[in-house]
Amino acid sequence: MLLGALLACLPTATPTRAQQPPTCVEIRLPESTLWASFEVPEWTRDAQLETRLCEQYGHGALTAGRFGRATATLRHLPASDGRDSRAWREELGSGERFEVGVVACLRTEQRLPGEGRTMARFTALPVVGGHAFQLHINSLRIGTQDSCPRDRFEEIVRSWRLQSVRRGRPSDLPRAARDELHLGLQAWPSWDTAMLEGEAPTPTRLFARAELLWLARSDASAIESAHERARTALSRLETPSRDERALLCACEDALGRGALERTDAERSARHLERAARLASDLSHSGRGAIELDFARALVRLQRHEDALDALARALAAETRLLLRAREEPDFAPLRATKRFRELVHLAD
């Protein structure tokens, strides 16, 4: 059981309400473009607790950490098989049942050794896009001091999002786009039908639709058309905000990668060059991968020196791309050059 580990992780200092914005905890589902996220104050990942979670639940364990005197664990449940949030809650047994929006929740209490010490155990069971999760929070109460009262737990549940992010992290996208991706996943395909039948959609909704079409494995031409529509809407803005430039970067990247897959190197290079420039300006966490794909397109155009420049920028931004660069088939024409070998640290 995790209770002993949870108790060991609970500090004894009196908690204070966080004055700074909460931390957005972002967790990528293994071998997927899907990211789960939620917001908590003063989050610290706990590697020891995470290890215990993995020992108990295997690959379903996603993350564990603490905030104040509370601990939180998140795991990906087995295939939902059409079960909704309330159906998952039925498997947890008795306790105080309540809902936060469409998310079924459960609260139980356990008295602990020592006067006035109680452990409140909150569980939320979000189900989105056919994926079910269990967010579990243990909140220590000493006397009247509660490390995570119910209203704070409900804030955390309301911040829950599941979104598809193909490049970088959820925080690289504006909050409005993450919200739309979450809502779209939650109600697909009816979300798409309602958007198409509604008023003129915003660029944010156009972007979300394009990404969800890709996630749904729609026809390649429909995906490209949707990204182009979003890109066009964003390009027409006279003074785009940082959020709007982040969406434009994602659209250019998607169009560039689509063209690269179709072996249209010229078009791919054009879109990826724009995406790389925007990613650099925005300090996008996926800018290295964008530059690497740009380098691939440049090699196909036989612009080898430009490709090496792009590869250098890619590796400077993300050193973890080193192995991918060594093994990338598109870089075969570069492998004999001294500069390539220096960039990827290959001995002569």
Image (tube, rainbow, N blue to C red):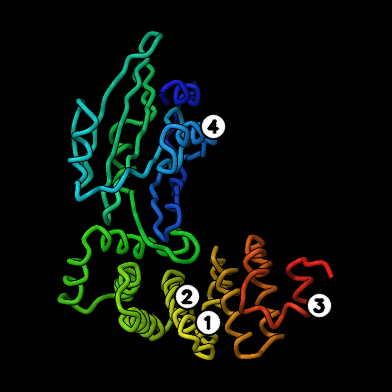
Distance from Cα at disc 2 to Cα at disc 3: 32 Å
User: Quick one: 196 or 223, which is closer to the camera?
Assistant: 223
Q: Who's the residue at 39% across and 50% down the image?
A: 37
Residue picked out by circle 2: 249
Foreground of the two, 258 or 170: 258
Q: Amino acid at mark 2?
A: Cys
Residue 209, above or below 89: below
Mark 4–mark 3 CB contact (< 8 Å) = no
Q: Residues within 10 Å of mark 1 (few under 14, many from 20)?
A: some
Q: CA distance from mark 1 to mark 2?
A: 7 Å
At 38% from the left edge and 62% from the top edge, which residue is drawn? 164
**Mark 4, other Cα within 10 Å: few <14 / some 14–19 / many ≥20:** some
293 with respect to 107 (left or right) = right
Counting residues from the start of the chain, the first of labels 1 and 2 encountered is 2
Question: On screen, 328 above or below 85?
Answer: below
Q: Secondary structure at mark 3?
A: helix
- Residue 244 appears left or right of 348: left
Q: Which amino acid, mark 1?
A: Arg
Front label number (2 vs 3) = 3
Which element type, helix, strand or loop, lies under badge 2? helix
Labels 2 and 3: the sequence-earlier one: 2
